[in-house]
Image (spheres, helix red, strand yellow):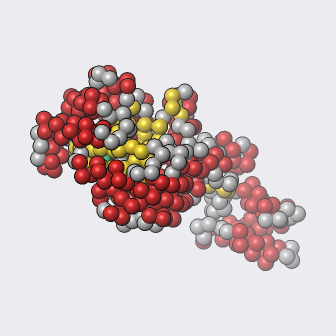
């Protein structure tokens, strides 16, 4: 089974979510939880962005012992020096350099031609090599870069000494087929690619970040970059929990696995949501409140007979206590009886149960969810005299 490395960027790209600002203490708290989750690598921030971020990255670097800690840097010496300072004390430091390669970025943002992009990136990698053993180089906006130029820049980065080359779909523009094809092309055409790792970094502007990351894996990517809960710039990044659970649940298909501690997924998700102030939508895959909740009578009946009828993974795997049978207007007698039993009402006669069920359906028509308190009220108030 092939190992897929997980590069978590919750503390950098995730923190770039509009409205999110994590202080040093919060970054360290999340970093320690990411370490428990078992991420291979974590990007702690962008030290050149502010003295506060440099200090926060340094605090993370000193606190984390079992994951590689990474600092982001533009392809310029002052940024690289800021990462050097920020990663003092790190057990396993890594520099993440980037430079845009797409025609749109070359023309409008960098005002550089292809030759200048190659020269600038190479000079940065060679300067960084004096101080860092581990360097990842990212071709920003690789998704909209000419395929032959992607190959040319990747070959240069390998020669200059990068250990990981990242090919990001920076603006979430590509389809899985197109993104997978970039990896296939690089794997087949770039000399020396077998000596480095290729990384995928996707954004969710068209809702395809997870699908694109999985397509990259199918075409040879060794590492997936993403964030917890999929937070990040604009519509966010690949949600790590989605990729990890897709690989876990469909090992038969992907033949690849991460080394994450799955039972820490839910706890990590809650912590990130709390400290970033970004709520997790109820229907969010894997970690949403409804991900293991069943409302319809048909589904509840199936669940009570055999859980795999409507669940492809168990909530316990990701650290959620149990599935929920939510009572609403679609629920049936089986789930109703099960809920009453759990509340201790297991001695009702058939007639009492029928009366209570009719009352419950009346209430469920008026209310989205019928709570435990509602059930108690139905039983205590309506059935006492029956
Ligand atoms: O989306 C992107 O291209 C990035 C780079 C800095 C890797 O976040
Ligand atoms: Zn990004």
For the residue pair 149 and 79, the one nearer the viewer reads as 79
Q: Residue at x 75, y 54 (%)?
A: 334
| Number of marks | 0
Q: Residue at x 52, y 41 (%)?
A: 244
Give the quarter of the figure containing the N terminus: top right
For the residue pair 176 and 197, the one nearer the viewer reads as 197
Give the quarter of the figure containing the C terminus: bottom right
For the residue pair 249 and 257, the one nearer the viewer reads as 257
Q: Which residue is drawn at 66% across and 71% down?
A: 363
Q: Where is residue 160 in the image (x, y as percent from the top left)?
A: 26, 32
The quarter holding residue 202 reads: top left
Could one spot residue 215 in this view of the protein? no
Q: Position of residue 245 (x, y in %)?
A: 54, 42
Q: Position of residue 70 (x, y in %)?
A: 40, 47
In the depicted structure, whether residue 263 falls above or below residue 178: below
Q: Residue at x 57, y 50 (%)?
A: 36
Q: Is residue 317 left or right of residue 196?
A: right
Q: Is residue 337 left or right of residue 309?
A: right
Q: In this view, does 341 lie to the left or right of 317?
A: right
Q: Where is residue 256 in the image (x, y as percent from the top left)?
A: 51, 31
In the depicted structure, whether residue 210 falls above or below residue 190: below
Could one spot residue 262 in this view of the protein? yes
């Amino acid at each position: 089974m092939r190992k897929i490395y997980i590069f978590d960027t919750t503390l950098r790209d995730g923190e770039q979510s509009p409205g999110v600002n994590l202080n040093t203490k919060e970054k360290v708290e999340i970093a320690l939880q990411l370490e428990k989750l078992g991420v291979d690598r974590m990007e702690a921030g962008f030290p050149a962005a502010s003295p506060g971020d440099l200090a926060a990255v340094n605090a993370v670097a000193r606190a984390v012992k079992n994951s590689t800690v990474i600092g982001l840097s533009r392809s310029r010496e002052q940024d690289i020096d800021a990462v050097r300072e920020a990663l003092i004390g790190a057990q396993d430091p890594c520099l993440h350099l980037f430079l845009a390669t797409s025609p749109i970025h070359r023309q409008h943002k960098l005002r550089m031609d292809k030759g200048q992009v190659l020269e600038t990136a190479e000079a940065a990698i060679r300067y960084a090599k004096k101080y860092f053993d581990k360097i990842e180089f990212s071709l920003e906006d690789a998704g909209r870069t000419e395929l032959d130029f992607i190959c040319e820049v990747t070959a240069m980065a390998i020669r200059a000494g990068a250990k990981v080359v990242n090919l990001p779909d920076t603006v979430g523009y590509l389809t899985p087929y197109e993104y997978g094809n970039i990896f296939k092309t690089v794997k087949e055409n770039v000399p020396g690619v077998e000596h480095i790792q290729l990384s995928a970094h996707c954004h969710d502007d068209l809702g395809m970040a997870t699908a694109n990351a999985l397509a990259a894996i199918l075409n040879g990517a060794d590492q997936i970059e993403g964030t917890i809960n999929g937070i990040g710039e604009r519509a966010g990044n690949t949600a790590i929990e989605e990729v990890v659970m897709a690989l876990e649940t469909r090992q038969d298909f992907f033949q690849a696995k991460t080394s994450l501690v799955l039972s820490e997924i839910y706890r990590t998700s809650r912590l990130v949501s709390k400290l970033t102030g970004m709520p997790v939508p109820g229907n969010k895959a894997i970690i949403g409140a409804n991900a293991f909740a069943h409302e319809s009578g048909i589904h509840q009946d199936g669940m009570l007979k055999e859980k795999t009828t409507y669940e492809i993974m168990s909530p316990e795997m990701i650290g959620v206590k149990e599935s929920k049978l939510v009572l609403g207007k679609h629920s049936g007698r089986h789930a109703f009886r099960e809920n009453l039993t759990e509340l201790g009402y297991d001695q009702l006669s058939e007639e009492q149960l029928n009366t209570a069920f009719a009352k419950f359906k009346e209430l469920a028509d008026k209310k989205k969810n019928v709570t435990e308190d509602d059930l108690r009220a139905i039983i205590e108030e309506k059935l006492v005299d029956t």
